Amino acid sequence: MSGETDARPATSGGATQWSDAPSRDALQLIAEGVTKVAGFGIAAISVVRSDGKLEVMAVAGSDEAGESLKGRRTPIDQLSREIAKADDWGLFRFVPHERLDASAGEQWGWVPDIDPIDDAPDAWHPLDLLTAPLYDDGGVLRGTLAIDLPVDGRRPGEGQRAVLNTYAEQARQAVIVALEREMLSEQVRMAETARRIVRRATAQLSMDRVVEDSREALVEGFNAAGMWLQTFDQDGHGAIYSAVGREIELSPAMVQIAETAARIAWEQQQPAVVAPDRPFGPTITDEQGELILAFLAEIGVQSLLFTPLGAGPECLGNLVLTRVEGAADWTEAEATSALDIGHDLGRAILNARTFEREHQLVEELQELDTYKGQLIATVAHELKNPLTSVMGHLEMLESSPDFSGTTRSSLNAMERGTRRMVRVIDDLLLLSKVGDADNPVIPVRVDLRKIVDEAVDLITVAAGQKGLAVRIDAPDEPVLALGDATELDRVCANLVSNAVKYTPDGGAVTVSLARAEGEVVLTVADEGIGISEADVARLGTEFFRSSNPEAVAQPGTGLGLAIVSRVVARHGGRMSIRSALGEGSTFRVFLPSG
Ligand code: ADP
């Protein structure tokens, strides 16, 4: 045995690990057959690796040779050079030692330590080379069976050569099967890796991102030249995400074929392969298949694997992976993995769609809200001036001595009505001001004690009329909050006036102030009519008034708490409401301390 060698381990140099034990055993068995039956001391079977080297996979006959040979890698060129000088013995090639290139260097890695048996021409020389190159049906070299050390010390005669040929044929078939199995399991492994990556990518909510993150994995995992992915929208259009590297223009006819085929393929859960000399299968008609092949030829692609994408009964798109000439055929295992990926990507399309719809809806709602705010602000502004003028004139008329009796009382009623309208308009204007993000609070230190005192002062008359006791429970020293004094004043006034308004005669209202960690707390508690749980959830919505008839009986607009909650929110504070029907309510406002 002779030749250049490379003693790198089998796992390096671009080769994959020979993981398939049954294949290895089959090769070993054949090598042992040669040593036990065909009368040779040593036999070695090698396979061709993707990096163009022959790797020794099975050695029989000598443990010592086995140790040193297994995993050895030899360039194919070396073998070709030696075989060129060989005698043709059927499947075997024999190179007598005298023809071997002396500069060939090291032997296959192992030279038997023997001398020729005698001087006869058929005596075996330790440097004689007897190897069967093993070709597949396409004439491609896939491995070798090399033998050495004839037991009788002689070069094999006709009879022995015939036996050797049968072993060479067996070895040929075993090597082909082993390599195919290895390739298949490698394909499955790669496709599964791609699937894992795609699956992770599908957590993204935009289809662009999903495709961006899975593109490379798909192309690499499927050993593809490129890919494109088409999604269908409900209106039948959708997007095409194109191949890696170069952009591919799909004609409308091609898109249409792909869409129809995808729907059938999803229904049948059957990916399709389009390749020359291969039936197109149930998904694609012959006519469509020919059109696709012609298109592929135009863009320099040999074949494609076509996978439908979907979720549940709905087909949502298709994925196309392409291969150029010379690449392996698409296998069943790859098609199965691609279909699994089709399910993952289908779910991703659905997620992306839902997300997009929600996003759109939120945007629309926000627009509507902005519009509502603008409408309220505009109307309030427009009404404010004429109302002020009406108020002025009414006050003037009321102070005139020309009127008396019913006219005067009408004027009074008109003034009360107008005053009420002015209050509503003022509330609306304030509401729009505190809801305007472009008009933030300019915070200063505000003493809440003063604000509370003023609010209680203002309500004293009304409270007194109802026989209500309003109590203040606050520390002696200032309680400072950070905020806008006018706005905080409205918060306090609204809460206190509500407490008085919604508490029946004779009840009690307590307004308290306290400091907590980094916050100040304003509490307004009453023993009034209370609010139901359902109504509490809706408090703070503009114009909301509770459904409780006792509450509706009181005058009000439903704007007070809306103003309170917006002011509190824009101060970076929060509000809590504890209430039960018939038992009273407690409103608590937490504000940043000053
Ligand atoms: P308004 O008092 O003008 O109706 P608000 O926005 O101040 O508007 O209050 C909204 C609703 O919340 C009121 O209509 C009332 O039903 C309920 N509410 C507010 N404060 C209290 C309270 N202290 N006790 C009972 N109900 C209340």
Image: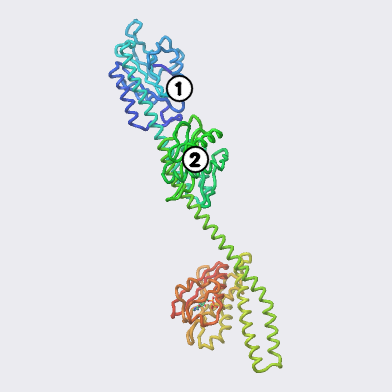
Res. 75 mark: 1
| Image quadrant in which the N terminus is located | top left
Where residue 575 appears, as percent x and y from the top left, is 51, 71
The residue under the point 51% across, 55% down is 355
Res. 359 mark: none
Mark 2 against mark 1, which lies toward the viewer? 2
In this view of the protein, can residue 211 be seen by the observer? Answer: yes
Disc 1 is placed on an element classified as strand
The residue under the point 50% across, 30% down is 325
Disc 2 is placed on an element classified as strand
Q: Which residue is mark 2?
A: 320
Nearest the eye: 273 or 439: 273
Where residue 23 appears, as percent x and y from the top left, is 34, 29
- Taking the view exactly as shown, the residue that stands out farthest to the left is 37
Where residue 51 appears, as percent x and y from the top left, is 46, 27
Where residue 60 appears, as percent x and y from the top left, is 32, 22
- The earlier-in-sequence mark between 2 and 1 is 1
Mark 2 belongs to which amino acid?
A: Val
The residue under the point 64% across, 93% down is 406
Q: Residues within 10 Å of mark 2 (few under 14, many from 20)?
A: many
Mark 1 belongs to which amino acid?
A: Pro
In this view of the protein, can residue 6 be seen by the observer? Answer: no
Determine whether 84 is above or below 30 in the image.
above
